Amino acid sequence: MLIDIQNLKKDYLMGEFSVTALSEINLQINKNEFVAIMGPSGSGKSTLMNILGCLDTPTEGTYLFDNMDITQLDDDALSAIRNKHIGFIFQSFNLLPRMTALQNVELPLMYAGVEKDERLKMAKASLEKVGLGDRWRHKPSELSGGQRQRVAIARALVTKPGIILADEPTGALDSKSGIEIMEIFTQLYEEGHTVLIITHERDVAACANRILEIRDGMITNDTTNINTKIGELSLAN
Amino acid sequence: MQLGENISIAFLGLIDHKFRSFLTILGIIFGTASVIAMVAIGEGAKKQAIAKYQDLGVSNIIVRDKDLTDNELEEVRMKFSKGLSFADAKAIREILPGVISVAPQSEIKLDAKSGDRSSKSTVIGITPEILEVLNYTTEKGAFITTDQYDRQLKVAVLGATVARELFSYENPVGRSVKLGDQWFEVVGTMETKALFTETVGELASRDLNNDVYIPLSTFNKRIPKENQYASEINQLTVKLRNSDELIESAAVIRNIIDRHHFNNDDFSIIVPFELMKQEEKESRIYNFLLASIAAISLIVGGIGIMNIMLASILERTREIGIRRAIGGRKADILGQFLTEAVVLSISGGIIGVFLGVFLSVGITWITDIETSLTLYSIIIAFSFSVMVGITFGYLPAKRAANLKPIESIRHE
């Protein structure tokens, strides 16, 4: 089991009031699953993803990632887990604008302490995997939205993480680029990766083989999706 | 992450913002440059001050007649003091241990004339011993010899200014000058000496280049005394073998002359070396003050760095969030921004050193102020600028490292 969450609760302090963002979350995710988390805005899905991605810590409950108790780790250890085991993909790409595509992909390896030559090789291979082998010299501003998201995927993949966490990855893209990105996720899943997408679009969620619905900070539905057909993806149109 | 990576990231970041980086380090540049230039000015002044005492001889003790009014002079004569005399010189030579030489001299202000030109000068009667106590070198001709002294010849050696005023650029050697109402033959001219513009103890300030040297024997025979009570000689310059015992020797000299002058307080003793040490001490304080004022501008420069870095961190909050999300530790972020501050201040320091050296040389070139560049001032200014960068870069870097990843990654 890759992820095992028991009785997780997350409160936020808003001034004097404590707001509960997540409560009674119990969730197990195995290796090589393609999970979609669905829910309207404010439902707590982003909070869940932040906790899953070790960017935030739960108020109560336990979170085992690959049998490591995340709640017991300090900031440096959490950074190391984010670096080695988690690949983030964001709605707004979050690339560093002044660096080239290659430098952006190299960055996690730099924090991992990989030597320069090895780093370049791995980063180039990762860019080739997402079909941008010839664009490594370009800066994000010289790339289309779809291409930028593919650079972000290359960056997420470069450290060979245990799980890929994507937060609304198609949210800022046109439908054609969105389909291309979802095709990449499907391909990664088929190659054996564990992929978790957060979305509020049913069509995007339909690509996954397991769909979690979240509402008011609780998981309300956990279904297995047999008909994962990316061809039927219509997205915005 | 290795240091090398951090440095290259920092450089990339700074090159991206060339103009802003330049503005940031401007304070450091001027701070470093002003520390170097200020210290150079101070050191130059110190050097000049010391040169003045070296002209007086650092292992010498000078005994001088006090400048007394006619009434006071009459009083001390009534109390049996004859003023400074050859007998005093002889006594010092015989009693004081470690004496190399005692050179008596007399002086009087007279106009030196040649043809229709005239120069205000101080005529100094010297004995050949002067060459043993002071480093007198002639530019043209030769200095007064023992033979000329013994024969009481009317020969003179002119100071550089007197020679120029009377003879322009012609060679004065062999020509005649009139001192008071006596004619003298010029046998030599002196090299230009450091200006002696401040009063040192009882030595009134005077321009050594206005001196005219004649044999003391001739002086006493040919030049009329100022008044009937005038002493035989005005000054004794005592040269000692060893400058460690100047204070003790000065005390012995005071005893000897006190006895000869029947305890009349009509002379004073000057120890140039002591005065020099005192002046050095004073100029150290003065230099420290100058450097401190300049250092304040360096600190202000450091505050500039802190300011711009805080602004830059606000602008790059999202970048910090991204770096944290993909695995950058707090220490990596701290290192990145601290390195930026250090790279900035080192660049500022290097440019500042060049500017400071340029300024110091330029000041001497344009004005007459003497400056003296010293390695220590450059090292201090440079290391201080780097220290300022680290100190003022730390707070912003720490703040950047402590930003919460989830909040900063959503920062617009």
Image (cartoon, rainbow, N blue to C red):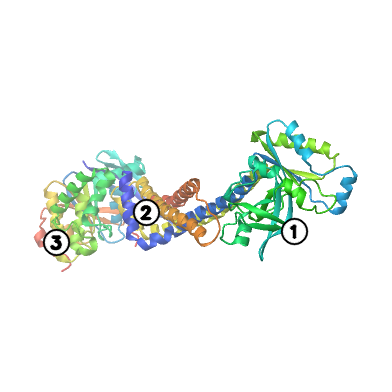
Percent position (x, y) of residue B49? 61, 50
Considering the image in quadrants, where does the C terminus of chain B appear?
bottom left
Find numbered disc 3 in the image and state the secondary structure of the residue it sits on: helix
Badge 2: chain ID: A
State how far apart marks 3 and 2 are (Cα).
35 Å
* Residue highlighted by disc 1: B181
Q: In the visual, does A220 lie left or right of B379?
A: left
State how far apart marks 1 and 3 are (Cα).
118 Å
Frontmost residue, A171 versus B280? B280
Q: Earlier in the sequence, mark 3 or mark 2?
A: 2
Q: Amino acid at mark 3?
A: Ile
* Residue highlighted by disc 2: A20
Frontmost residue, B311 versus B24? B24
- Nearer to us of marks 1 and 3 is 1
Find numbered disc 2 in the image and state the secondary structure of the residue it sits on: strand
Q: Is residue A199 above or below residue B232?
A: below
Percent position (x, y) of residue B50? 60, 47
Percent position (x, y) of residue A110? 27, 46
Frontmost residue, B224 versus B325? B224
* Residue highlighted by disc 3: A179
- Nearer to us of marks 3 and 2 is 3
Q: Is residue B165 above or below residue B2?
A: below
